[in-house]
Amino acid sequence: MAEAFVGVVVENLGSLIKEEIGLIMGVDDEMNKLSSTLTTIQAVLEDAEQKQLESKPIQNWLCKLNDLVYEIDDILDECATQVSIMKHRRSSRYSLKNFLFRRKIGRRVKRVTAKLDDVAAERKKFHLREMPIDNRAREIAATSRETGSILNESHLVYGREEDEEKIVDILVNHVRDNQETLIVLPGGIGGLGKTTLAQQVFNNRRVVEHFDEKLWVCVSDNFDLKILIKAMIESLTGSGSASDLTQLDTLQRRLWELLNRKRYLLVLDDVWNDHQEKWYALRNVLACGSAGASIIVTTRQKKVADVMGTLPAHNLTGLSEEHCWLLLRERAFGQEEKEYPNLEAIGKEIVKKCGGVPLAAKALGGLLRFKRTEKDWIYVKESEILDLPQETLILPALRLSYHHLPVALRQCFACCAVFPKDYRIQKKELIFYWIAHGFISSRGVLEVEDVGDEVCNELVLRSLLQDVPDFGNNSFIMHDLVHDLAQSIMENKVPGTQNVRKNVRSTPNDKIRQVNLLHKYVAFPKSSRPEMDMSYILTNFSRLRILDASCTKIEELSSAIGNLKHLRHLDLAFTPIRTLPESLGSLWNLQILMLNYCPKLAALPKNTRYLKNLRHFFLEDCTSLSEMPSKINDLTGLRTLSLFVVGHNRGNQLEELQCLNLGGKLEIRHLERVKNPMDAKKANLADKKNLRRLRLVWEGNNGSKLMEDVYEKVLEALEPHPNVETLKINGFNGRCFPAWMTNSTLKKLVKVSIEGCQNCLRLPYLRELPHLKILRLKNMGIEFIVEDEVEGGDALSIDFPSLEELELCELPNLKGFFKDHVDHVMREVSPNLRKVKLIECCSFKFPPLSSFKQMKRLRCSSSTWASLSNLNSLTKLGVKIDKNMTCIPIETLKSLTHLESLKLDLSNELCVLPEEGLRALKSLTYLRIVHSKTLTCLPQGWLRHLSALETLEIFDCPKLVELPEEIKHLKSLACVYLNDIPKMASLPKALQHVSSLKSLYLQDLSQLNSLPDWLGNFASLKWLCIWSCPMLASLPDSIQGMTNLKYLSITNCPELEKRCQRGKGEDWHKIAHIPNLQIYKY
């Protein structure tokens, strides 16, 4: 990663020189020399990165350079910080304090310049070539492999039959008369089998018979028009007949002669070009074929698909574990007839490392060729891909994607390795990490967060990150092999060697840039520090950029935090911290401060106003915070302030928000303290165009008529910008909502929540908001959702046209949707409604479900449930049993033919679920039973017929001790949650018969004192989580034999935590084989 880090430091040096930082500090000449020397070294780093694979001296030289660049980066950061403080405080560079700093920094710069000169001189003996970045990627691509159309081992291709048939069908049947050249693009990471699939299609009998001519060109990185045309001519003629042609026009004419009016198939393999102009130039040359002429392009980059494709990209998915095993077995055993059942069992575990990538299966199989001892196979199974011998070729194939990254993106990619495998990476979290490490900066009119968003998109387009389905564009995952690649880059890891990670504990403390206290790791590179606590961190890691102490039990923070002068990112979210030291205000470089969900935090430091570089300040659900520190408006760089608590004094009232360019989410609490509506106007919410979510909260309202009028005027003055998408109002005790809520100015609103506004008897006019998807109303006195009369012109309009979720809670007076009900208009309400929550609305008459054809989810009382008809569309149902409900009607249950999820709240009474009705729940995969005060065991007949059930969750059932024997009939049951069951002293015996179990969660079982030995019989169990079971003192011996167990999490189990301490606990030997262990207090 040296070349990427050097690039960052060179860029920073250039900025500092331009801003005359060196001149101010008296080290301008040295800074210019550093810049020149680093630029010279940077030119040979691409060559050095490749040659280190075979040269230990070059590898050591790169490590030495990397350490030195860290030191240079720290010095530059201190210079920039000191000058920034001087400018802000308008202090003279000749003051005694600044003079002493300049003298000290001058000596350090001279020392580091001399060290860099030595490193630069040493490089000469390695005879490294200067090489532009693009040339390096092209050279690696050219030397790594060249593909052809012949598929020599077609019988060894598994799992691609459907993909081949789909593409062949498109080529042969669907584009026969298409006048345009067609592009079909299999995408995905390296080694997924794109080229192999293209070869299958190219040689398919139907394709051979359908096309007049077929051409294959391996493009790689060199998308040069003349070279490509020459390659096409040679592919068509089978000779080097184009070698004498040098002029582009001559080449084009020759290609036209060969392809004119012919239906041809061209495969362009391994394309990296994403420049539209180059593609259009080639496309124009190829526009000579007949109808149905087609092009297949293989690429790793979605961006290429967007540029070149005329059809949606055909994205390859990974192979199944079964198909990966067939590939691995073929490579490992070849034609050998002898069977090795013991090795096959291990091999089926090894293929899980492949992540569905055929190249990985082949490489691991090749590694195991001629190896027939369990020891050899277990070694491969228990080793990381990074540590396996170099001939595996997996990472070299993937590393090509890294070399095609612009240098500015390389460290951003490698940084992803700090997250564990399978972790859902939040986009915001990742961008904040990049900002804190200085990997990205603002560019022109783009703020640094916008640049981070662009980088995320680029990594997705290059298939290095993958969007998580159903989570929009806000979170990602990394393929396991891509994660291995990122980790190898972060660690400067040479494939096939193990020495680096075994020695990472020796990483100097002044090189540590990032710490996670909960998981006890440091970076870079990432390594474990199990002995680490907050005192250790503050004493030893003075160069930190990121300190993450979230989800720990920290209650106070030492004033020594102020010594972390380089700190950019401090995360104390989800902790019981009560106070923060005033020294926090001396963290001049702090840009991100995370204090979400700190319910005991009562006050913020008075010196908060001095955090001049703070950009993001998160305070969600800090419920004990009584007011803001004064002069928060001094933080002019703030882009996020998730909570503002109105104070009583000047300096912490709403006018502090006036000049802040806030975006994202903002909650304003204690609005009852605003006595003058003009103060509310000074918050200037109407001009905050980047604000997307706004919550306005009144607490402890004065119910006088005078104050009602003040509340109404205050809310009127808090009109937000039309860009707001979420609006929440809580505790407003005025009688009428303001005009800006009723005149449809907020056309971008997606979510509206109104709660505790008891004086308001009429809702604002919301029915025509075009994008409103979620409406939540709670604890109000309204009688109808729409009070205004329906005029004749509205009869054909659709009310709430985009509404998908409707939540109505604690609305005792609510009678219906409309005050003036009109049947033909009613049918036009919320055609997209999918989810309804209806709680404690005793007067509300819900329309027939047939009125809402899209509705899939319902949460309501049992009486409401029993009164409804046409329930067969529901897939998810949550029911709270009423006190007077003793039995659910059989017909009600029978109508739930498509139900997949059922949640039963038995807090009022245990009612009867007729067994005959339960037989109808053939699609039920999830059952949750909560809040029963009387259940000792689930009633017989509740589980027997739920043949599709996959997840059973039981929560807050204080008398439950056992599960029924009929649970053994649930052959699909894969996951069981037992949570907050205080009488349960041992696992239910009936559970031992559930052989299909893959996940078991035991939480808040205060009397659980042992786990049975039959736990080891769960051969399929992968996840075991034991949380807050204080009486549990040991694990059964049988856990050693649970070879499929991949994740063990133990939290808040004091005795068990001691026995499971890494390397020295009495039970450590029982769990040492489990790959992912999380054992900590919370």
Image (tube, rainbow, N blue to C red):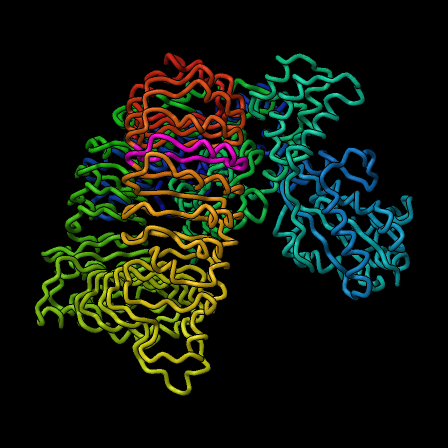
| Residue 792 visible | yes
Where is residue 356? Give x, y as percent: 63, 36
Asked where in the image residue 809 lies, by quadrant, the reply is bottom left
Asked where in the image residue 708 lies, by quadrant, the reply is bottom left
* Figure check: 286 above or below 222: below
Where is residue 225? Give x, y as percent: 76, 53
Q: Residue furthest bottom?
A: 792
Q: Is residue 964 magenta?
A: yes
Q: Residue at x 59, y 29 (%)?
A: 353
Q: Residue at x 45, y 33 (%)?
A: 418
Q: Horizontally, is 170 left or right of 379 in the view?
A: right
* Figure check: 448 above or below 854: above
Q: Horizontally, is 50 left or right of 941 in the view?
A: right
| Residue 503 visible | no
Count of number-bearing discs: 0
| 102 or 1037, nearer to the observer | 1037
Where is residue 444? Give x, y as percent: 44, 56
Asked where in the image residue 183 lies, by quadrant, the reply is bottom right
Q: Is residue 1010 magenta?
A: no
Q: Where does the C terminus fall, quadrant-wise? A: top left
Q: Which residues are magenta?
A: 958-981
| 916 or 186, nearer to the observer | 916
* Figure check: 559 above or below 63: below
Q: Horizontally, is 683 left or right of 1064 in the view?
A: left
Where is residue 800? Give x, y as percent: 41, 71
Q: Horizontally, is 397 left or right of 269 in the view?
A: left
| 12 or 908, nearer to the observer | 908
